[in-house]
Image (spheres, rainbow, N blue to C red):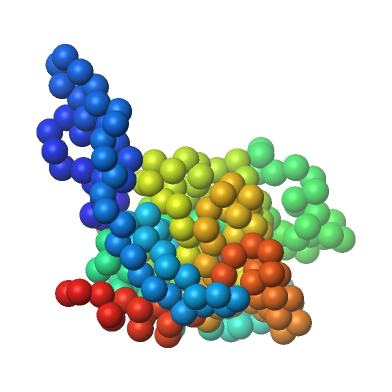
């Protein structure tokens, strides 16, 4: 983690927002929370005020298999270039959020090599005829197996390489919350608001966001920090549904403008 670690002696926990303090004779579980760090953010359907001290950005599936020439989407004839649209905005947003001490959490598809936790319905999702190149199958040119943890295929694109202090979480479903430690990590960091980015807007981003909403988090989709190779109507429906049911929609320009107004 970057900067939210408590520093007092005896602090137990990874965040100043939520920790205990221990001595030989006593454990204090009633530590006061730090004062909010409000950020007024332009958004739809309403503007929002978020607490930067209790906010994280979750970036989903910005991986070679989805976003890079020679990756899986490219290999099967998909439009990998469309998923790259989020790279530029994220290159601007992530450094600004790190400077504001907002945790950066990468949630990436990372299969076990043996696919032991992947039921038939998940394998069918990406190999619905029973043939072709699906999860765990080898890519040409020795670039590894599709979305296998530790491979080039599953690595985050070079343009967005994680920095020390960022947090990486592996997933193996469309939602980043299902059967992963993501919720536990966010709660231990004291996070109550999540900024969402990544690909695909209408699939892994949307369903991670909806699960976060069901778990009680405040959710903000950064629209231009998300991308998809799906038809445009899929993005339109996703944005409409997020604004209607699941949270708020903003973008990198509005976020950067808000961050620029913070005291230095």
Number of numbered discs present?
0
Image point (15%, 16%), residue name: 24
Give coordinates of residue 194: x percent, y percent: 48, 60
Q: As rendered, which of 106 and 195 lies closer to the eye?
A: 195
- As drawn, is 214 to the left or to the right of 234? left
Image point (87%, 61%), residue name: 129
Q: As rendered, which of 166 and 34 lies closer to the eye?
A: 34
Q: Is residue 25 above or below residue 156?
A: above
Image point (59%, 47%), residue name: 215
- As drawn, is 70 to the left or to the right of 125? left
Image point (31%, 57%), residue name: 36
Can residue 180 be seen by looking at this rendering? yes
Give coordinates of residue 61: x percent, y percent: 54, 64
Quarter of the image for residue 9 reads: top left
Q: As rendered, which of 73 and 234 lies closer to the eye?
A: 234
Give coordinates of residue 256: x percent, y percent: 36, 80
Give the residue at the far right of this rendering.
129
- As drawn, is 36 to the left or to the right of 209? left
Give the residue at the far left of this rendering.
9
Q: As rendered, which of 158 and 233 lies closer to the eye?
A: 233
Can residue 230 be seen by looking at this rendering? no
Quarter of the image for residue 29 reads: top left
Give coordinates of residue 225: x percent, y percent: 50, 77
**Quadrant in which the C terminus appears:** bottom left
């Amino acid at each position: 983690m970057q900067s939210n670690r408590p520093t007092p002696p005896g602090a137990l926990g990874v965040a100043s927002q939520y920790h205990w303090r221990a001595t030989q004779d006593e454990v204090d579980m009633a530590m006061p929370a730090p004062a909010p760090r409000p950020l007024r953010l332009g958004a739809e359907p309403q503007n929002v005020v978020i607490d930067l001290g209790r906010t994280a950005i979750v970036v989903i599936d910005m991986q070679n298999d989805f976003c890079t020439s020679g990756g899986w989407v490219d290999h099967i004839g998909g439009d990998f270039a469309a998923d790259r649209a989020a790279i530029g905005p994220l290159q601007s947003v992530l450094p600004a959020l790190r400077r504001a001490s907002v945790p950066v959490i990468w949630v990436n598809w990372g299969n076990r090599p043996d696919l032991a936790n992947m039921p038939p319905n998940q394998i069918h999702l990406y190999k619905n005829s029973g043939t072709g190149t699906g999860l765990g199958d080898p890519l040409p040119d020795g670039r590894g197996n599709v979305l296998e943890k530790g491979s080039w295929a599953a690595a985050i694109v070079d343009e967005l390489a994680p920095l020390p202090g960022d947090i990486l979480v592996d997933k193996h479903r469309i939602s980043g919350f299902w059967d992963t430690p993501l919720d536990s990590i966010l709660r231990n960091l004291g996070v109550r608001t999540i900024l969402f980015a990544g690909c695909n807007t209408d699939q892994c981003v949307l369903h991670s966001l909806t699960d976060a909403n069901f778990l009680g988090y405040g959710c903000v989709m950064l629209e231009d920090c998300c991308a998809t190779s799906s038809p445009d109507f899929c993005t339109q429906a996703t944005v409409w549904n997020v604004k209607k049911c699941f949270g708020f929609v903003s973008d990198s320009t509005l976020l950067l403008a808000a961050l620029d107004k913070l005291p230095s």
